[in-house]
Amino acid sequence: MKEILVNLGPRSYPIFIGNDLISSTDLFGKLVNSGQVMIVTDSNVEKLYLPKLQTTLKDIGAKSHVIPAGETYKNLETMNSIISDLLKNRYARTSCLIALGGGVVGDITGFTAACYQRGVRFLQIPTTLLAQVDSSVGGKTAVNHVLGKNMIGAFHQPSAVIADVSVLNTLSAREFSAGLAEVIKYGLIRDREFFEWLEKNIDKLMLKDTDTLEFAIARSCTNKAIVVEQDETETGVRATLNLGHTFGHAIETGLNYKLWLHGEAVGTGMLMAAYMSMLNGWINSHTYERIKLLLVRAGLPVQMPAELQHADIRDLMSVDKKVSHGRLKLILLKEIGEAIITDTFPEQYLRVTIQHFHHGHG
């Protein structure tokens, strides 16, 4: 088992990465000391892993709350149903929530933990690759509003993150590829050596080789931890973790969060950011092609879906938390391994980029 510390003073916590950690009574014995534990999971994950986790926690007698699966349910109504359950069962401030699931479950459980009685502990047990390398680490929690994604939320760090690589075996190829978008992101924004390692090892990763996976997850989490330590509440460098996300969120919003997974939108979004970086004269066409090839080998789409033919992507990009004082901020690449946050770019470059990806090039 690998252990990485997210060093945030009194809010520090470990990330554990290993095989079959969900069954480890030792590990959970150390992490869960309260008698009042509520596992929040969704209808997909429930069938796969809830019985296993309940067996591990049988001495504690954890209750569970199952929410419907999907981004559509990441809202205040669902959150309220969890809170009602906690209140009905008279859960105190000493209780602990456990998020067992992907990004949606992690986000909504974390936000519930942040709000319930002004804050209770919670553990993250991410069950998708994307959640293991990205959304479960760093304490960003939120729900969506009809007018915008993640617009209602709080920074609330977990007590621990438990990344069990064995759960990735039940992930569909699509979900797995979606997670790889966030893995590749770390190479692009701050870890050139890791990007080069990914170019060599992507085929082994696609086969879910355990050691290769553990390395990629640990390296991703280490990168995320360093960025979060430097800038917990995203006033500066943490924004680089959003490479491709402003484009990606616009794609997701245009599709009504249907058809594409978050990681697929981010993958295409990162390539769009790379294309724009190329127009800016920062990266050359060879570098752009390397990035594109890695995304393709990771099973990710590299052009916008045809369904978006008439959506105004530029307009959708304006409804984004990264807009400040009316100027759109983008994360672009100076080079592989070096990201830059900028709001000074020719508007026509943005238009050209959107046009290019609309017409099925990538």
Image: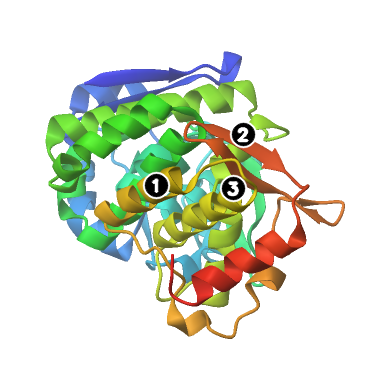
For marks 3 and 1 on the same chain, the one whose residue lies earlier in the sequence: 3
The one nearer the camera, 292 or 48, is 292
Q: Residue at x 36, y 45 (%)?
A: 290
Image-based side of 95 in relation to 61, left or right: right
- Residue 95 lies, in percent from the top left, at 48, 35
Give the amino acid at mark 1.
Ile
| Mark 2 Cα shell of 10 Å, populated few (<14), some (14-19), many (≥20) | some
Res 246 seen here: yes
Check the image and report above or below for 32 versus 141: above
Residue drawn at (61%, 56%), measured in percent from left and top? 246
Q: Earlier in the sequence, mark 2 or mark 1?
A: 2
- The residue that mark 1 highlights is 291
Whole-Å distance between the Cαs marked 2 and 3? 19 Å
Mark 3 crowd level (few <14, some 14–19, many ≥20, 10 Å Cα) = many
The local secondary structure at tag 3 comes to helix
Q: What residue does disc 3 label?
A: 277
The colouring scheme, among rainbow, by chain, secondary structure or one colour, is rainbow
Specify whether 337 is left or right of 165: right
